[in-house]
Amino acid sequence: MKLILEKRAEHSQKMAVLSPLIAIALTVLVGGIIFAVRGLNPFYALYIYFIDPVMSLWSIEQLVVKATPLILIGVGLAICFTANVWNIGAEGQLTMGAVFGGLLPVMFPEFQSPLVMPLMLLLGVIGGMAYAAIPALLKNRFGANEILTSLMLVYVAGFILDWLVRGPWRDPMGFNFPKTVTFDGWQLLPTFGGTIHMGAVLAVVAVVVLAVVMGRTLKGFEILVLGNAPRAGAFAGFSRTKIVLFSFLLSGGLAGLAGIGEVMSTVGQLQPTISPGYGFTAIIVAFLGRLNPIGVLFAGLMLGISYLGGEAAQVTLGMSDKIAKVFQGILLFFILACDSMILYRIRLITGAKPQAAPAE
Amino acid sequence: MTGQSEFLLQTIGVTKMFGDLAANADVTLKVAPGEIHALLGENGAGKSTLVKMIYGSLQPTSGELFWMGERVTVPNPAAARNLGIGMVFQHFSLFEALSVAENIALAMPGKLDLDILSERITRVSKEYGLPLDPSALVADLSVGERQRIEIVRCLLQEPRLLIMDEPTAVLTPQEADQLFVTLNRLAGEGCAVLYISHRLEEVKQLCHNSTILRHGKVVANVDPQKETAASLARLMVGADVHSISARASRTEGPVMIETSDLSMPSDGPFGVSLKNIALDVQGGEIVAIAGVAGNGQSELFDALSGERQALTGDAVKLCGTNCGLTSVTGRRQMNAAFVPEERLGHGAVPGMPLSENVILTRHSAASGLTRSGFIDREVAHQINDRLTQKFDIRKGKRDPEARSLSGGNLQKFVVGRELDREPKVLIINQPTWGVDAGAAALIRQALIDLARSGSAVLVISQDLDEIFEIADRIAVISRGELSTPRPAGDISLEQIGLLMAGAHEKGAAKVERAKA
């Protein structure tokens, strides 16, 4: 008797919808077990982690703030992964977006004008794009594996930011703290009353635009074809190298925008740490959202909860907020596992003697 | 049958069915110790199937295998190696980042000491005239040297039977000569060699005995030394002569497909370089290119379609325009159409519905499929429905994924998608490969109809029946060299067989001269 994975004739539409839901359900189940093992009442703990954060207006605002960078980055990565291009370095592109955009208020703190805000956003996008172009060019020119190069560049970006805020860009009036001047006036994004800032609007715009591109345009078709069957893509006259560069610039630009958005709102200055790993979590967002821009919108909110839940678990349950990373990891694991059910089905083979064959 | 036998290996009445298709039917093969035994046949004749059953990667449907007179079953390749059967594959699987010794160690059973192994490799490789440095990285080695690794790997297990699948296909003539010395020496020591090839001169030079397969059946067992290359070719391709009729009253049109001196280096270790290909196809005619698979057909197709660009613009001319440097999209816009050999993954995206696969090759043409970058899916559906009707594509629903169609129906779709555009030039690689008879007939008729309407059609095919059925002129490709196309009425199967074995190659001519 044995279990086999059997290929389906076509993609199962039903599983494509069910897979992320099953993954979330399994994650909650395993989370409950983890809480129980820690001696907590699993139902109460799960309530605190997943439900409590969306019960008050204040925390829903927080959720949107957390989801904003996740959605911005996740939607870019969704396109990238669809093209079978593996940008794992969004966290570094986010950092470089913040650094490029931060250039303006740090170098010219006195420069206040309505122009400053769009200029900073633009610089942020350019920073992310420029940084993402490095792994893209290395891949196209030398065939270097973009997973490795983009990931390693994350740490390089982290050190560049660290050096800047401890060295040349440190606020001279800042009591030697490793921070730049605090941004002010036009150097900050406008908010909607509370803490939700204009980045949220940009995220929704990005989702809608990319949903149209992927669903309706030849460019989107090109990305799908090259991601699915590169040989057929070449036969259709599409260029793999151009798409590699395009997907990196797109996802890098959006990550840069998320980065500058963070320092122009919640962070308000440059400091050694500006993101709790949004660039990595966005990878989960992209997959949980089925690599579909609209799906990413919901997945971003879902993963936003995991951050808030981590904070809640720390405050209310006395657990480390690293629990958020654990939940995110478990979720990604189950998504990828459930996704195999879209093209395969599980079958139980009984009786027949297993034919010795593989050996090679 | 018990006791000693004069034969090392015998297959008695071996049959292998794949569905309704008999890949091998009642095959009897006898190999004596110390004999270099050729297994000859066209592609699809059943050589690989037979060898895979001997090596244990396939199980016969019926029939028996005898090894040194004892009846055996070979459940898997490991069992074959235990019996003393080694095999060198045509496409070898080596880890480029590892050294020669490490690669060999991976294939050896049990634990072993790398230093001792290296020493054995050096000794064995020297003994058999296959110099190898055990510490060299595979990535740095030539294809010939890589093949030596595979051979040495087999020799280390002291085989009694060595199976070689088209070993010279990837070798230079000098490397091939070196290989023959080694094989002769092995045979002298009593090791039998089962040598798969379709290069007749080579077989005549090397082999003591030969078994010839056609359509899965043994058609002859002859001593190649006593045969001529021509008689072997006739046995291989079959003497059941076709009713060859040069199709009458063909209107001569302008030359629509032209290559002059098209050369292209191969793009990988298993690729074939194209050498000075000269070809012309007029509007209104079908020219067919015959040849055994892997002799440059797909390279030639890529060069003509523009998936690989030529070195100069004038190397390829379509519809009278230089387009050696033009992209595949640019060539389609000149009203040329292409159908590659691989349906899934090259001609169509497996996971996409047919309507989207329509867009794949037709987004550039003025078909209303795209307007300023946006796709009109309604038009794609209309085209898909039209193809379904015109080419009798059978499918479960209106717009299934390409992968769910049967081979014949998908081929009708892929061919129909191009014919529906009424192209002035059609280049098609293996139009009916793996397709049922009904679909094949429909596709061939469609090709003839297209040519009669004045278009130029170039068919690359391994199926000689097909070629004689539809072609006006025939050329043969072998190791990247193309013979001069000749009218179908003036060329016999025997001549084609000789050309397939490389009679027109410049290299072959030199060898002949050297012998004289």
Image (cartoon, rainbow, N blue to C red):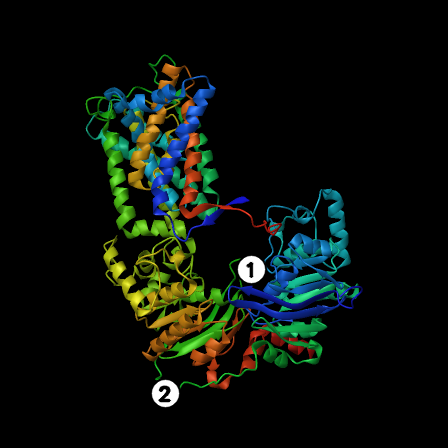
Task: Evaluate whether residue B161 shows in this view.
Answer: yes
Task: Evaluate whether residue A91 shows in this view.
Answer: no
Q: Earlier in the sequence, mark 2 or mark 1?
A: 2
Specify the amino acid type for callout 2: Ser
Residue A159 vertical placement versus A133 (above, below): above
The residue to which callout 2 is attached is B249
Badge 2 element: loop
Q: Residue at x 25, y 35 (%)?
A: A204
Specify the amino acid type for callout 1: Phe
Which is more foreground, mark 2 or mark 1? Answer: 2
The residue to which callout 1 is attached is B270
- Position of residue A3 in the picture relative to residue A133 (left or right): right
For the N terminus of chain B, the quadrant is bottom right
Residue at the top extreme, as displayed: A175
Residue B443 vertical placement versus A227 (above, below): below
For residue B323, what is the image quadrant? bottom left
- Position of residue B506 in the picture relative to residue A257 (left or right): right
Task: Please state the horizontal and vertical placement of residue A187, each as a whole percent of the image.
Answer: 25, 25
Task: Please state the horizontal and vertical placement of residue A247, each as a whole percent of the image.
Answer: 36, 44
- Position of residue B75 in the picture relative to residue A1 (left or right): right
- Residue in the foreground of this view, choosing between B235 and A225: B235
